[in-house]
Image (cartoon, rainbow, N blue to C red):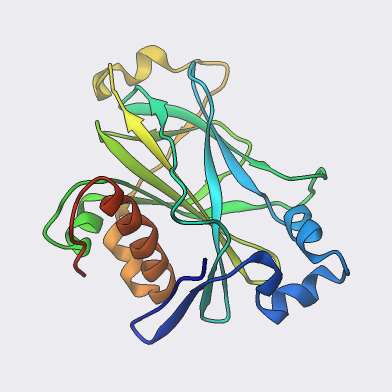
Amino acid sequence: MMLSMTYLGLSIHNYALATLPNEIKNDMKSENFETNFHSLVPTNISVIPESLPAGNLYLSSILSNGTATYTRNLTDELFPFQLDRWYQQIQFVPIYQDRNPNENLTINNLVIGELSDFDSFDELLDQARIYKDVPLNSTTILDLRNKDISFMEAEIIFPNGNSGIYYGLYDGNQQTDKSELKLYMKPETKPSSLGSVPAIEIKSNDLLYNVTFTLVCNDLYKLGYDRCAV
């Protein structure tokens, strides 16, 4: 399957791994490109909430030189993981195929929002939130007030300047509210609480905005919403 479209003058393509851009291939420096691609970047991000089974954010796109290359079949169904607190203690752990990485990576942008039938995609982003510089392999607290099927999208910028977009769904079933924050925090972990801003901020980054549009609207259609206007 190949998906090709243009938003705001930027090309967006869906290719098999073997046809990723040449500059990404050159970074691999190996004849066995597909295997080494998965060894150099996380294949997914494990989302580990307190006292609940882990979920996953899947590598869905690579951003390189103004082009988005999709790395998974967008027709595949994603199954939501569960979250049950307003203020959720959570860890994001990068999963590699066959190595123990040493890079000091960070989630540069974490976009979280509810999959709802808003009048426009920008209205959806106005209700969604974006967190900056979310640490990996460290417990933090996110304000997750959405109580229905929602999306979680993480952008990680790699040392070569390319970005990986990791995307997944969760089902919010909050049993607490923000007044219980101090009651369930474990003193020994001392997790930090991150602030956020409306996710419409990503509109200043055309490529990230367009990829978010593609991934989110793809799931909105699967939920039965028949339009996703900009």
Query: Which residue is located at x 30 percent, y 58 percent?
Result: 217
Side (left or right) of 180 relative to 155 = left
Q: Residue furthest left?
A: 119
Side (left or right) of 101 relative to 115 = right
In the displayed structure, 36 sits above or below 140; it is below
In the displayed structure, 30 sits above or below 179; it is below
Residue 41: x %, y % from top left: 70, 55
In the displayed structure, 177 sits above or below 75; it is above
In the rendered image, which quarter is residue 6 located in?
bottom left
How many marks are shown on the rendered structure?
0
Residue 223 vs residue 67, the one in the foreground: 223
In the rendered image, which quarter is residue 150 located in?
top left
Query: Which residue is located at x 37 percent, y 68 percent?
Result: 209
Residue 75 vs residue 109, the one in the foreground: 75
Q: Residue furthest front?
A: 1
Q: Quadrant of the C terminus?
A: bottom left
Residue 93 vs residue 195, the one in the foreground: 93
In the displayed structure, 116 sits above or below 157; it is above
Residue 183: x %, y % from top left: 36, 12
Query: Which residue is located at x 80 percent, y 59 percent?
Result: 36
Residue 51: x %, y % from top left: 49, 16
Q: Residue furthest bottom?
A: 9
Side (left or right) of 59 relative to 195 = right
Residue 74 vs residue 158, the one in the foreground: 74
Query: Which residue is located at x 19 percent, y 52 percent?
Result: 225
